[in-house]
């Protein structure tokens, strides 16, 4: 081929010309095989003796071995790849409507992926709006959750972090100009676990029926919380203990004297009334005498006393000294300062916060949908059966209470560690996954992938996605909506979001250690960043170690 012919520009055809040529084939124009010129009068004369395809098909080059002459039955259109490059057959979207927060994209179809759990319920895609998130540390679990909270704010959905154990949500609040409430060592904030919240302010404006209904709900929640806290101290309360607590709470709050005005109460007041009951109390509860009442309630009294004098003294047994701005798009309770007091202290704090936040959000009259994040909820459920039942109750009431419960965990065995094998606690905890219609499964090891496959009924290909593709980068997850096939979703963060959601900032910004006070000049090793494609220029140990001495 000559250079002039090779460099000659190709003539392009516009859409009208392409359509006319395509239609001409379909209309059997003059050049089409088997057609004849029209007769006078507009009638078309068809050939009777058409050439039929050979029995074994045409043998000419380019014809193929077709049983019929396809060129006579289907119009043929010829075009360059530049003209039909936008045609991609056999592709379909994932079926999730484009409503809600745009979180990323579906890697199988290339389409955008949107999340709105309440819309999924209304459209019949799922039976409840709750979500469960599983993922190894470093796989983008926290950034996926925070991105969902941030983007759902654009649709009027507010969020409450019911216990931020590691302080991972605090940067988001500060970026939005919101000051999180920190509880623990050195913090002046106090939260009364028996706080009435908006009940006390709205009490006089309610009818007698509404007062009885709301008070019954509050007293039941308080009784469940106190029995769960007593169970966390090693004592299993009885039905008589529950009746005693309910009666004491009713008397202390002032509901027994005509529903006129409710009085604020604290856990120390409950302990004092149990330790020193008046005659009317033990007679109402059908005890023989005061001594029998004190002896029977001694163990639950001592269990609740540990909350007043133990590692949580002063945190949940004093009046609440802060006000939450419920008009803010997100609020958080930071418990990172409590970690030094042990896992049990954190678990008790999560129980108190769960009960308090449920009561507060139940009484909001704004009608908004709220996302309640329960990070490391397995810590709370390890307190005992009643703690597990409390979480189970909140998940079951999510639709009625206009809440989206979001459980964040590492692996399914977290739920199995809440009690002994075969216990009622473990049985209820395993059923919690059935109360979360949406499961977000980030990268996991092969062993954990086997657990997820057993618990969630994953297909072999879905399990391979979790242990393979999702492990190759952060933010990759298999989104499983009940029994529908899983979707391979890649969460996409902006540069600003990556800076706010950076959970490795503490490692990256760690200050350099001071020289040893012994004067030897030897310092402890510290982590340094390793440039992509090579080791640090200085201070590299033999064998490629990234520790600088």
Image (spheres, rainbow, N blue to C red):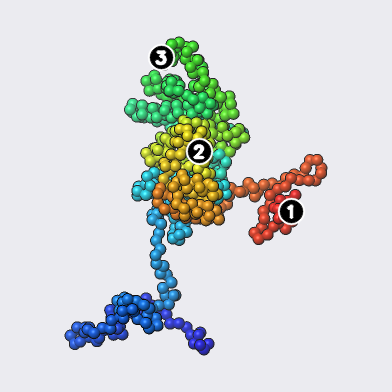
Q: Residue at x 55, y 39 (%)?
A: 165
Q: Nearer the viewer, residue 174 or 22?
A: 22
Q: How many marks?
A: 3
Q: CA distance from mark 2 to mark 3?
A: 40 Å
Q: Quadrant of residue 339?
A: top right
| Circle 3 or circle 1, nearest the eye | 1
Q: Residue at x 52, y 28 (%)?
A: 232
Residue 248 relative to residue 511: left or right: left
Q: Which residue is mark 3?
A: 286
Q: Say which element carries label 2.
A: helix
Q: Which residue is mark 1?
A: 541
Q: Which residue is mark 2?
A: 416
Q: What percent of the width, then of the height, locates residue 2?
A: 52, 89
Q: Say which element carries label 1.
A: loop
Q: Quadrant of residue 84?
A: bottom left
| Mark 1 Cα shell of 10 Å, populated few (<14), some (14-19), many (≥20) | few
């Amino acid at each position: 081929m000559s250079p002039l012919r090779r460099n000659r520009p190709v003539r392009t055809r516009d859409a009208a010309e392409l359509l006319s040529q395509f239609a001409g084939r379909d209309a059997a124009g003059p050049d089409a095989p088997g057609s004849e010129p029209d007769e006078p009068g507009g009638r078309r004369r068809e050939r009777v003796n058409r050439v039929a395809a050979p029995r074994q098909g045409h043998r000419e080059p380019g014809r193929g071995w077709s049983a019929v002459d396809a060129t006579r039955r289907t119009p043929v259109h010829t075009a360059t790849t530049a003209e039909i490059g936008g045609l991609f057959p056999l592709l379909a979207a994932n079926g999730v409507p484009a409503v809600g927060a745009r979180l990323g994209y579906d890697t199988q179809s290339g389409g955008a992926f949107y999340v709105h759990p309440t819309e999924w319920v209304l459209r019949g895609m799922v039976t409840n709006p709750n979500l469960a998130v599983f993922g190894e540390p470093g796989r983008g679990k926290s950034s996926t959750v925070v991105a969902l909270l941030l983007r759902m704010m654009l649709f009027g959905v507010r969020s409450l972090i019911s216990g931020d154990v590691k302080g991972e949500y605090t940067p988001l609040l500060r970026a939005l100009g919101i000051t999180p409430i920190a509880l623990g060592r050195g913090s002046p904030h106090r939260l009364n676990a028996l706080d009435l919240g908006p009940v006390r302010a709205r009490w006089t404006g309610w009818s007698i029926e509404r007062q009885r209904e709301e008070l019954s709900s509050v007293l039941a929640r308080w009784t469940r919380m106190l029995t769960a806290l007593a169970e966390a101290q090693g004592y299993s309360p009885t039905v008589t203990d529950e009746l005693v607590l309910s009666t004491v709470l009713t008397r202390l709050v002032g509901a027994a004297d005509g529903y006129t005005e409710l009085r604020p109460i604290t856990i120390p007041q409950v302990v004092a009334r149990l330790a020193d009951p008046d005659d009317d109390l033990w007679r109402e509860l059908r005890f023989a005498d005061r001594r029998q009442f004190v002896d029977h309630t001694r163990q639950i009294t001592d269990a609740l006393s540990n909350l007043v004098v133990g590692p949580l003294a002063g945190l949940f047994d004093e009046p609440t000294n802060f006000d939450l701005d419920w008009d803010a798009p997100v609020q958080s309770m930071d418990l990172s300062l409590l970690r030094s007091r042990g896992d049990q202290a954190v678990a008790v704090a999560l129980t108190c916060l769960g009960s308090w936040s449920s009561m507060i959000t139940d009484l909001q009259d704004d009608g908004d949908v709220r996302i309640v994040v329960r990070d490391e909820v397995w810590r709370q459920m390890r307190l005992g059966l009643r703690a597990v039942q409390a979480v189970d109750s909140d998940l079951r009431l999510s639709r009625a209470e206009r809440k989206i419960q979001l459980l964040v965990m590492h692996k399914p065995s977290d739920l199995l560690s809440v009690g002994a094998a075969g216990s009622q606690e473990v049985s209820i905890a395993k059923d919690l996954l059935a109360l979360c219609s949406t499961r977000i499964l980030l990268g996991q090891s092969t062993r954990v992938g086997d657990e997820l496959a057993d618990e969630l009924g994953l297909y072999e290909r879905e399990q391979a996605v979790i242990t393979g593709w999702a492990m190759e980068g952060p933010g990759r997850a298999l989104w499983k909506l009940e029994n529908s096939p899983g979707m391979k979703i890649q969460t996409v963060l902006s540069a600003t979001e990556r800076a706010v959601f950076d959970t490795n900032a503490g490692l990256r910004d760690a200050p350099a250690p001071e020289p040893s006070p012994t004067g030897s000049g030897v310092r402890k090793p510290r982590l340094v960043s390793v440039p992509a494609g090579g080791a640090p220029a200085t201070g590299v140990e033999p064998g490629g170690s990234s520790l600088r001495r």
